[in-house]
Amino acid sequence: MSDYSDDEVVSRGRRRGRRSRGGDGPVDGEPRQQEEQDPAKREALARDLIYRALGMRDHSRAELRTKLARRGFDEELTERMLDKFVAAGLIDDAAFAQRWVQSRHQFSGRGRRALAQELRTKGVGEEEASAALDTVSREDERERAAELVDRKLARVEIPVDRVERDKLTQRLVGMLGRRGYHPSMALSVVLDAIREKADAAE
């Protein structure tokens, strides 16, 4: 059974005071020096910080660990509190990674390379990251890349001049590369899209 109820998660997030501009700064009324508080007070402050963070969006365990460290909580308390939230099912790096990959791939058009880098930045472990990335197949990736290219080509005419067409190809390949698509896939998708649009125009 969960240590913390869903109602408590919501209500605690709504009751908290105004945050500082930095996002991780002290809430009004909270002391800056955590070591000045007794153990029970420090634990309550750490728990509330985690609730607030999770109330805004999903976080990996590593992200929450960083937030607690920035607020001056010691390692022992940090890991103990994070363990409680993991046991309660409120922190789950595997689920976090899968949701992150699906959302960023679908809505931001990120390729597997970019997604892998983002998960590393979030502190997700290799096993959890690999499982999440496997939910995006090569076919899924190619289809999403083609959608991005088609969207760009819808606003331009295919140049007849070979030099200008090469420039267009390079721009589109670069666009896919910045989103984390492998160069060979990016080039293949762009060439196919340009060829199809040029044939249709003829």
Image: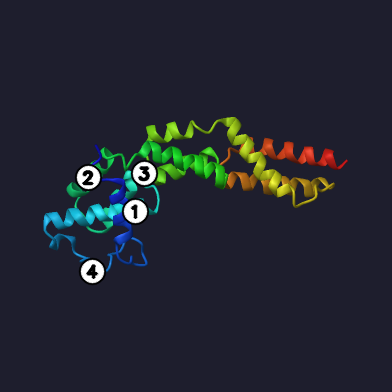
Give the residue number, with chain letter if any, for mark 1.
Answer: 53
Q: Which mark is residue 129?
A: none
Which comes sooner in the sequence, label 1 or label 3? 1
The residue located at (76%, 41%) in the rendering is 194
Identify the element where label 2 is drawn: helix
Give the residue number, with chain letter if any, for mark 2.
Answer: 79
Structural distance between the alpha carbons of marks 4 and 3: 31 Å
Give the residue number, with chain letter if any, for mark 3.
Answer: 123
The residue located at (29%, 62%) in the rendering is 16
Give the residue number, with chain letter if any, for mark 4.
Answer: 29
In this view of the protein, can residue 66 be seen by the observer?
A: no
Which comes sooner in the sequence, label 2 or label 3? 2
Which comes sooner in the sequence, label 4 or label 1? 4
Where does residue 14 sit, x and y in percent of width and height?
Answer: 33, 59
Q: Amino acid at mark 3?
A: Gly
**Relative to residue 28, is residue 131 depicted above or below?**
above
Q: From the image, which quarter does the C terminus lie in?
A: top right
Mark 2 vs mark 4, foreground winner is 4
In this view, the residue in front, 187 or 57, is 57
Which comes sooner in the sequence, label 4 or label 3? 4
